[in-house]
Image (cartoon, grey):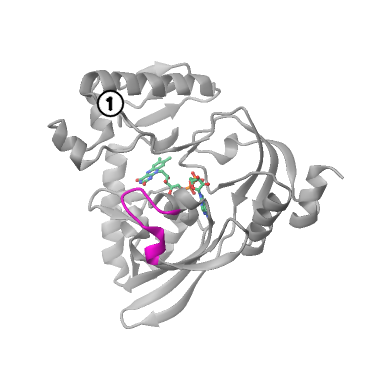
Amino acid sequence: MSKKNDLEAYLGKDRVKEKVNLAPYLTMKTKTIARYFFQARTREDLIAAKKASLLLNIPLILIGVGSNLIIVKNKLDFLVVVNKYIHKEIIGREGDSVMLSVSSGYPVGKLIQETINEGLSGFEYHLGLPGTVGGAVFMNSKWTKPVSSFGDNLIYAFVIDNKGEVKRVEREYFQFSYGFSILQKTREILLEAVFKMRKSDPPILKETAADSLKYRRLTQPTGIYTSGCFFKNITLLEKEKHGLPTTSAGYLIDKSGLKGLRVGNFYVSPKHANFIVHEGEGETADLLKLVKLIKKKVKEKFGIDLQEEVIVI
Ligand SMILES: Cc1cc2nc3c(=O)[nH]c(=O)nc-3n(C[C@H](O)[C@H](O)[C@H](O)COP(=O)(O)OP(=O)(O)OC[C@H]3O[C@@H](n4cnc5c(N)ncnc54)[C@H](O)[C@@H]3O)c2cc1C
């Protein structure tokens, strides 16, 4: 039996594809060929994929909408799983709040629009954030005005651990901080998260969300191939140490004179210096060269080592 057949014994007949180009599944649209490819549509699909990966010894990579992933390898000898597990339900009510369970493949944009229309407050600042709930919890995706993070209202969740077992974990387990959740270390798979949402008026939520989106459109380029902010902002400690006015990595790149800097088909956005833009048909070797150049110039100018915020594989 081929490995594809072995995988299909767990994942279902004709559900595993071979040698799939991942460009359509990554917002940066770089080309990488996945050896095995599977779209998970249910909680059971995700559990089966994890178990198959363990039993057949094939490493698994989970993709939400690939808006924070940079794959620089031309080929991945992995099982690549795209998360299309989409489900949401109110599972409890407590005074002025509701407990909302959301599956990890739920598109964040859809979730935000729906909760705003339903008068549920908690995600409105994030309007315009691409990705899935799984990716947003993994990254604890954040917004600046006001400072807020996707995990702020998470109460508990279900994850698949590295033995393929499902476990319930409480909020504290995630160790949320700016741009961080424990999933980045444990590599466990989020299945569903339960959020406490406050009841509010849809018109108020719509206005807040519209303000956030307006600021996003003002500061970020749109309609391009990118993975958003490429580098992490520096810490407050570094800001103080270097006497800088801000922690923004974009500021450091801008002040190093790098807006518009180009290698091959990749360039630094003239609108937001922490966005790297891909024109299409680019070689990832050029992207790596550009990243190296940005780091070198920022180090020369400020003595600071920029760290990638995106997940690089
Ligand atoms: C135009 C643009 C604007 C952006 N704006 C912001 C912003 O304002 N704030 C911000 O913080 N980020 C921003 N981002 C980055 C990105 O959108 C977020 O980090 C997003 O939450 C990632 O979700 P995703 O589903 O695309 O994750 P992916 O990129 O698919 O995956 C990212 C990582 O999460 C892991 N992962 C995905 N799903 C799960 C799961 N179910 N369980 C465990 N691990 C999982 C993946 O394996 C991978 O390691 C932006 C990106 C773009 C392109």
Dot 1: within a 10 Å radius of its alpha carbon, few (fewer than 14), some, or many (20 or more) residues?
many
**For residue 24, what is the image quadrant?**
top right
- Residue 177 magenta: yes
| SS of the residue under disc 1 | helix
Q: Position of residue 128 (x, y in %)?
A: 38, 49
Left/right of residue 306 with respect to residue 86 in the rendered view: left
Tell me, yes or no, whether the highlighted magenta stretch contains residue 247: no
In the rendered image of this protein, does residue 40 appear above or below residue 204? Answer: above
Kindly give the residue lying farthest to the front in the view shown: 163
Left/right of residue 194 with respect to residue 246 in the rendered view: right
200 left or right of 18 in image: left
Above or below: residue 57 compared with residue 278: below
Instruction: Indicate the position of residue 3 as horizontal and vertical percent values.
Output: 79, 43
Q: In front: 279, or 3?
A: 3
Disc 1 marks which amino acid? Ile
The residue shown at (39%, 34%) is 308
Magenta stretch prevailing secondary structure: loop
Q: Is mark 1 within 8 Å of ligand 1?
A: no
At x 68% / y 52%, what residue is drawn?
54
Q: Residue at x 78, y 52 (%)?
A: 8
| Image mark count | 1
- In this view, the residue in front, 193 or 221, is 193
Residue extending furthest toward the right = 1
Magenta stretch bounds: 171-182
Q: Residue 64: give x, y in percent of width and height.
A: 53, 49
> Is residue 32 something one can see in this rendering?
yes
| Residue 12 seen anywhere in this rendered image of the structure | no
Report the residue at 87% width, 45% height from top.
1
Residue 190: give x, y in percent of width and height. 52, 58
Q: Which residue is mark 1?
A: 253
